């Protein structure tokens, strides 16, 4: 279990994360959602100990996580937004370098390299240098590199940023399989459909503060599972209904409108987006 307790990070007079409290269960696929500047990446950076909290603490299985807690740190592996790999290395060399950083035996590095490159569908490209890989292949390689140390927790900061639709779906499948094998995954993403598809629970964060924590399905049910969209000359207005008959009744009086299923993006817009647009 990951416990985030009153976690706060300030930069001079700016508060990026403001007394955040979360519990993430072992084996959970958990999402952090929020607009740009909400504090998602800062939270991930503190969870990976790249940044130190101004206040509060993070505990893993009851033990305090900090830069000197080597046992807890080895349970974590992080994938950042940036491609943090040497461009002149081959896939095999990237994996070997990572293994040496963690003092893994050569035999173990070779075996795990074979295991994870095969798992990600990258085996035939093992000799290709990083600069000649597609964006999607680089992201997959970053996942393989993170898994080489066999972490218990995988921290993902917008892992599909810049990917095309096919590569994104391939990454989704990889992450689902990893989670099904028991890996705890914490994900930040700007793609709300990604969080709806992958996450058991999500936390909505705005200006560093927690808005709510719940399952995507329950948040959608609370808003209303049937959405009716009306387009005017300068605006799109969505109304939400808990019962299909009520939505159809509204459509009868407004034939220019259209009905669809409510999504997690609708929840995000109603809870966070509308507040932003009013400022």
Image (cartoon, grey):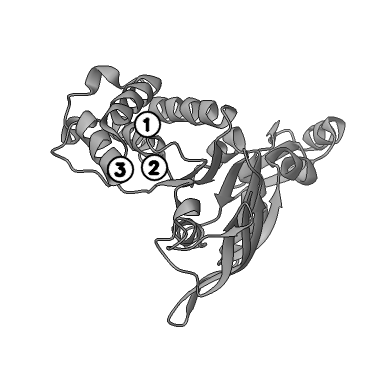
Q: Check disc 3 and report the residue beneath it.
A: 103
Q: Nearer the viewer, residue 36 or 93?
A: 93
Q: Check disc 1 and report the residue beneath it.
A: 164
Q: Nearer the viewer, residue 199 or 38?
A: 199
Q: Nearer the viewer, residue 151 or 84?
A: 151
- The residues bearing labels 3 and 1 have C-alpha atoms spaced at a distance of 36 Å
Residue occupying the point 69% across, 32% down: 261
Question: Looking at the image, which residue sits at the far bottom?
Answer: 13
> Does label 3 or label 1 sit earlier along the sequence?
3
Question: Looking at the image, which residue sits at the far top?
Answer: 124
Residue occupying the point 23% across, 40% down: 97
Secondary structure under badge 1?
loop
Q: Residues within 10 Å of mark 2 (few under 14, many from 20)?
A: some
Question: Looking at the image, which residue sits at the far left?
Answer: 88
> Does label 3 or label 2 sit earlier along the sequence?
3
Q: Nearer the viewer, residue 77 or 242?
A: 77
213 relative to 278, above or below: above
Q: Check disc 2 and report the residue beneath it.
A: 161
Q: Nearer the viewer, mark 3 or mark 2?
A: 3
- Residue 157 visible in the picture: no
Q: Is residue 129 left or right of residue 246?
A: left
Q: Residues within 10 Å of mark 3 (few under 14, many from 20)?
A: few
Residue 57 placement (x, y as % from top left): 57, 66
Choose top left, top right, bottom left or bottom right for residue 64: bottom right
């Amino acid at each position: 279990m990951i416990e985030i307790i009153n976690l706060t990070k300030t930069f001079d007079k700016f508060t990026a994360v403001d007394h955040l409290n979360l519990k993430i269960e072992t084996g959970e696929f958990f999402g952090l959602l929020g607009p740009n500047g909400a504090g998602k990446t800062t939270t991930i950076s503190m969870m990976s100990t790249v940044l130190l909290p101004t206040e509060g603490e993070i505990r893993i299985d009851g033990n305090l996580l900090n830069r000197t807690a080597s046992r807890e740190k080895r349970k974590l592996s992080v994938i950042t937004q940036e491609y943090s790999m040497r461009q002149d290395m081959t896939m095999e060399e990237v994996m070997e370098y990572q293994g040496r950083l963690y003092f893994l035996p050569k035999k173990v590095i070779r075996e795990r390299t074979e295991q994870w490159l095969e798992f990600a569908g990258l085996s035939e490209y093992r000799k290709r240098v990083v600069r000649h890989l597609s964006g999607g292949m680089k992201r997959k390689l970053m996942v393989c590199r993170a898994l080489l140390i066999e972490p218990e927790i995988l921290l993902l900061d917008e892992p599909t940023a810049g990917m095309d639709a096919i590569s994104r779906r391939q990454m989704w499948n990889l992450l689902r399989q990893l989670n099904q094998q028991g890996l705890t995954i914490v994900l930040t993403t700007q793609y709300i459909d990604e969080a709806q598809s992958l996450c058991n629970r999500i936390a909505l964060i705005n200006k560093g503060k927690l808005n709510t924590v719940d399952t995507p399905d329950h948040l959608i049910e609370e808003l209303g599972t049937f959405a009716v969209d009306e387009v005017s000359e300068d605006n799109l207005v969505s109304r939400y209904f808990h019962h299909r008959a009520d939505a159809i009744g509204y459509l009868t009086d407004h034939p220019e409108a259209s009905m669809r299923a409510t999504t997690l993006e609708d929840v995000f817009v109603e809870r966070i987006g509308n507040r932003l647009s009013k400022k």
